[in-house]
Amino acid sequence: MALEFPKDKWSGSVQEVVIGATAADGGTRATTVTVGGETTMPFIHFEAETPNRPVLALEIKDFRPDDWSALLLDFWGEAANDPGAWAKAAEEAGADMLLLSLSLTDPDGNPNTPEAAEKAAKAVLESSGLPLLVYGPGQAELDNELLVPVANACAGERVVLGICEDKNYRTLVATAMANGHLVVGRAPMDVNLSKQLNILIKDAGLPMDRVLMDPTTGALGYGIEYGFSVMERLRLAALRGDVMTQSPMAVSVGFETWKTKESKVGEDVPETWGDWEERAISWETITAITLIEAGADIVILRHPESLKRVRAAVDNLITAPELA
Amino acid sequence: MAISGIQIYKLLPKTNCKDCGFPTCMAFALKLAAKQVELSACPHVSEEAQAQLAASSEPPVRLITLESDGSKLEVGNEVVLFRHEKTFYNKPGFFFLVKDSEDPGAITEKVKEIDAFVVNYVGIDLAVDGFAVKSEGDGAAFAAAVEAVRAGSKRPLILIGDDPAVLADGLAKLEGEKPLIGTANPENWEAFADLAIANKASLVVTAGSLEELADLTPKIKDKGLADLVLDPQVTAFNDGLAKHTILRRMALAKNFRPFGFPIIAYPSQAATPEAEVALATQAVTKYAGFVVMENFAPETLYGLLVLRENIYTDPQKPIQVQPGVYEINQPTPDAPVMVTTNFSITYFSVANEIESSGQPGFLLVADAEGMSVLTAWAAGNFDAEQIAKDVKKFGVEEKINHKSIILPGHVAVLSGELEEELPGWEIKVGPRESVDLPAYLKQVA
């Protein structure tokens, strides 16, 4: 029997977004990444080509993050003490892109400063040629205080600034516009809230080819089913032509999974949880692959071994299969 | 074959008696068509109509049941492509592979270990569903391997091989059970179908292409065997996603009966244990009904079983716990009071940490409509007013001799408002993540 494979017909597509700028475009990056542009649900090659592969980023910090799992700190070793060295190590570990997430305080507990943030961002740009995302510590006022000077110092690099929420997006959008950067907005696991935030960002003047969205995903065992379904719904809405849901999705998998008990803690846990390191890496890998199946365009990880495993899956998924 | 609300309406009594809870028979018919209500809600429907509606409501993906001494697994009956459209109903079965080339004693040991694996997740015990025994030799070796598995586990079995006569020797050891056997292909399917029918087994069917598979299943059905499982011969992520999607889409959207069966996936064929976990992840998220694994490791199986639990949670019914005051580690009236929401994952994360800290405490679980702390806060279901209301409703004050309450760090912004709602109380801010609670409690104690 000759089969006709059931193809969905979509009117919309995900917005294509370029991150990073090479010397030709006024930046200093050795490479850029392009995400988005999909016209099907994830990797449905028998409907249409997937134009851009999901991008895998590694997260690094401006100061050694003593609250991170010992597994991560042991892995990175000395590099974690210096953002420049860490950026280089992360590039060598195979990342397509880097996230520099700024700390709330320095190692002595003093509030982080604009000078320190700017210095860290410059060190990262100097030691690595990869495109960059820079996220604030997640407190609206301090985010603005730190990210504006970083944005100025990185002018022209097409850096992604984050994270915009409905309360603090104005300053970040303004500084992104002034310096040729992009922004990422985060809404709490809700299609309409993601959409509303995109409307606010657009109304503030930033063109949509410079906007990413983080729908908030949860980790395996900690609400991933909500993130998974919100992402599937956002992608479906984008394909149906709802313009304000068409931003590529950037998900913070490392941040979500490495705060779970399964990943963070190796002692005083049930014996049936098995080996700590393998469990933590599996937790990050399973979360990442699940979200990639739901439409993630940028996956930000913390452990290079997870990156290697997720990369193997992505390399295969991005290739059109032979369907006999 | 799915039928419309109008067609269903014609079979109903048309009396608008409202006994089903809907205002009219038409309204009830539309709900039936949308599969949002059961026909049994109508007490007056005729037997003839019942029979007709039952035939027409045959599920787009057939329900397959495996049974053994004391265990039962149901797979299939799925009605949607995306879980948010309704829900995924029957969790895929996880089966571990053993080969009859292995020493029987070693098989029993391995099976015992896997069979005993139980891990608790938010109050639910997670375990594997059974074992797949693969034939690589003669009937005697296969029968010995099946016996060796049975010496270590009573869970349902899948028997896999190329030769129906060899499988028959294994099946002889499973009297009274309903296993899954395979694998039938376009050449050998008749002998496999006979064997499955004679042993009340379900049958895995495969073919070199989806076209050939679509030709094969109706032939087996015509021979009298309807309990089939599809093996689309997946080799990697990309063809797995494509084939599973095509099979599920055709079964649901096109009501294409030759593909109206659950799918079996073999992450066991992966080159490395890491790739096996990754393939199993895709199988769980994308439509597999049976997942066959080879490498057993608690640290990876735990994650996969949690993923299965998460993806198969009904999106319309977040798992909630009862709001109220929970006493942990026999608290006395001077013990601290902590507050969180009634989303089950949130509750269990917090309660487990308090319990393992050894510190006694009261945990006030506020009625936040089953949402996690941040989500509930964003949705306005976990604010100072709600917390104050639940403090009073559940009589927190009568249980303690102090007036202090610890908020989750994520909602530190509520402390000012809560001071106003609870005059005279001291509002403390705890850690943002539950994993940091034991250290915090040690510090405040």
Image (cartoon, coloured by chain):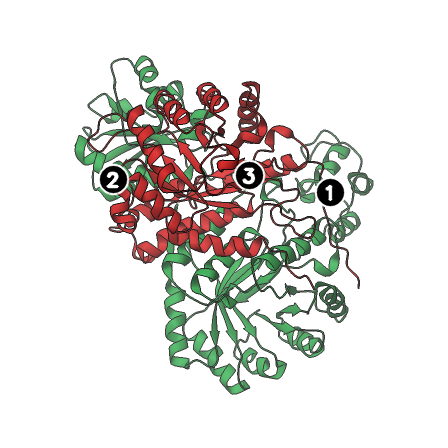
Chain colours: A red, B green
Q: Residue B117, position in %: x, y?
A: 38, 61
Q: Which residue is mark 3?
A: A231
Tell me which amino acid carries mark 1: Lys
Mark before the other along the chain sequence, 1 or 2 = 1
| Front disc: 2 or 3 | 2
Quadrant of image for the C terminus of chain A: bottom right
Tell me which amino acid carries mark 2: Asp
The answer to whether B340 appears left or right of A191 in the picture is left
The answer to whether A77 appears left or right of B94 in the picture is left
Asked if B139 appears above or below B157 in the picture, the reply is below
Assess disc 1: are there few (<14), some (14-19) or many (≥20) residues with their C-alpha within 10 Å of its C-alpha. Answer: few
**Do the residues bearing badges 2 and 3 touch, measured as CB atoms within 8 Å?**
no
Chain identifier of the residue bearing label 3 in the image:
A
Q: Residue A17, position in %: x, y?
A: 56, 36
Displayed quadrant of residue B168 = bottom right
Q: Are marks 2 and 3 on the same chain?
A: yes
In the image, B38 versus B384, the foreground residue is B384
Q: Are marks 1 and 3 on the same chain?
A: yes
Tell me which amino acid carries mark 3: Met
- Give how far apart the Cα atoms at labels 1 and 3 are: 19 Å
Q: Which residue is mark 1?
A: A9
In the image, B107 versus B320, the foreground residue is B107
Q: Which residue is mark 2?
A: A66
Quadrant of image for the N terminus of chain A: bottom right
